[in-house]
Image (cartoon, rainbow, N blue to C red):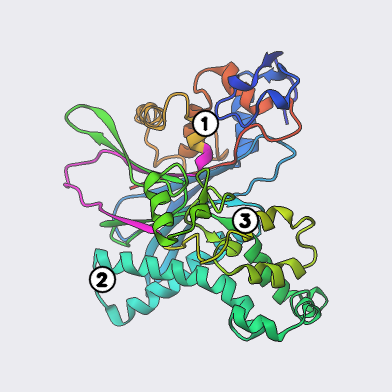
Amino acid sequence: MIVERASYNWAYAEDIPGSRCGPEDGPWPRSYQVLNEDELWRELRILAKPQSMSLPSTTKERWKADALNFQPSPSTKTQDRYVVTQLDIHGRLWTFTGVFDGHLGDVTVEHVAHHLPIIVREFLQKALENGAAYTPQSISDLFVHAIEAFDDAIAHDVLDLFGGSVDQLDNYTDAQIRETINDQHKGGANWRKTRLCMYGTTALVALVDPDHHNLWLANLGDCQAFFVSQDPTAQDWKVETLTTSHNGDNDAEVERVRKAHPGEPECVIERRVLGALAPTRCLGDIPFKQPPSFTRRILYNLFPGFHNTSPWEEFLVRNRTPPYITASPEVVHRRLDRNTSDTSQRYLILASDGFTDLCSGEGQKRVVESWARGMAAHDPSEGITDAEPGSRSDNMALRLLRRALGGEDRFGVSRVLTLDMDVAWIDDTSIVVQLL
C-alpha cells in the first residue's frame, strides 16, 4: 500500500462525490491522506484492479476492452462484477461484455457473471447452426429469450426438488425440505441452488457480432451504457445514453408495475417494489417472483439463512400476485457500420450505478466528454501489453474512474481513496470501456 503520504486533511460527508454518508455517520470532519500523483495512480490500481483485454476479430482493426471494479472501503466486499469475453460460435468470435450490480449478497451476481455468457453462447450456437443467417431482430429476440430462460432456471432448479411447483410444497414437511436443501455434507449441490434464490443482481450486457457490424445491449436494472463518438465536423465528442433506468425513479417503470397488479396499491411503496426493492427488473430476487410460500417454506429452512425474517415478512405480506420483478430485458440494437475514411475512435461504456453517483455533481455526460477529450491525446488501442497494467496512461476505464472521482483535483480524489471510515462511504463501481 502507500508507504509515504504528503499530508493529512479533513473532509465532510458532502465533500465526497456520490457519498452514502450523512451526519449520523459522524463525527465529522474525518481525516484523509493527501496523495501525490504517483501515489494516486498506485492506489487507484490497487483498489480498482484494472484489466486490459485484447479482442481478436475477423476485421483488420485491433479491438480492446478495459475494465475495473472499485470499492475503496477496506472493510467492504464489492457486490459488483464485470465480464469481458468472446464467444466462439461455430468458429467465429462474438464479443460479450457486461456489468452486474448485486444486492443483498454476492452469491447470485457471481453466478450470473460466470454463467450468463455460457447460456448466451448456447443459444447462439443453436440459432446459427449450419451457417444460418441472422437479423438484428432475431438476435435481439434471442438475447431476451436467453436471459429469461437463465433467470427462470434459478427458481425452477429448486422447485424441481419438490415436484416442480410451489403448490407441491404442501406434500413436504419442513423437516423434509431442510434435509433436501441443506445437503452440504453431500457436496452441497442443492444448497448452492437454493442460495441463488436469496439474492439478486442488475445486469447490463453487450454483444458485438464477429464482423463488428452490429451492437446489441440488454439491460435489467439501473446500470448505464454510453456510446461515445467523435463529431468529424465539430471536432468534439458526442455522448449518447443507450439505456433507461429500471427502478423506482423511472415513472414509466412504476406505472408498468402498477398496471400489472391492479387493485394492489402496495405493489409500489415510496418508489420501491413491495416497499422493499428499488430495481424493477433484475435477475434472481426470487421472493419477489414466486408466491410467499417459496420463501417461507424453502428459504426460511436454509442453513445458514435468514437470522431475522421480520424484514422479509414486511414485504411478503404484500406479495399477492407475483411476479413483481421481471427478468425481461430492454434490448437496444445499433449498427456499427462506418465509412472507410472514418478513422475516429468510438467507445462503448458500461457502468454500474456507482458511476452515476460519482458523477452526480457534474453529470455523467460532462464527465465522459471530458474523459474522451483526454483520451484523444493518445491511441487507446496501444498499451494492451503494457508491463504495468492500469498505469496512468494505458487503461481507459481507470482514466474514466479518475475523471469521475475528481480528475486533476488531487485533494478530491484523495478524499475518496483514503477517507478514514469503518463503513463504505461510496457505492461499488464497475466500468467496462470497449473500443468499437
Other-residue count near label 2 (Cα within 10 Å), few / some / many at <14 / 14–19 / ≥20: few
Q: Earlier in the sequence, mark 1 or mark 2?
A: 2
Q: Above or below — where is 178 with respect to 65?
A: below
Residue 134 disc label: 2
Residue 389 rendering spot, x and y as whole percentages? 55, 40
The magenta stretch is 329-354
Type of the residue with mark 2: Tyr
- For the residues labelled 3 and 2, say whether their Cβ atoms are less than 8 Å apart: no
Q: Is residue 393 above or below residue 322?
A: above
**Is 284 left, or right, of 98 in this rendering?**
right
Circle on res. 358: 1
Q: Residues within 10 Å of mark 1 (few under 14, many from 20)?
A: many
Residue 19: % across, % down:
60, 29
Query: Which callout, 3 or 2, points at the residue further toward the start of the chain?
Result: 2
Question: Which element is circle 2 on?
Answer: loop
Above-or-below relation of 298 to 212 = below
Q: What is the secondary structure assignment of the residue under circle 1?
A: helix
x, y percent for residue 433: 43, 43
- The amino acid type, in three-letter code, at marker 1 is Leu
| Numbered marks: total | 3
Q: How far apart in space, not on screen, are marks 1 and 3 (Cα)? A: 31 Å
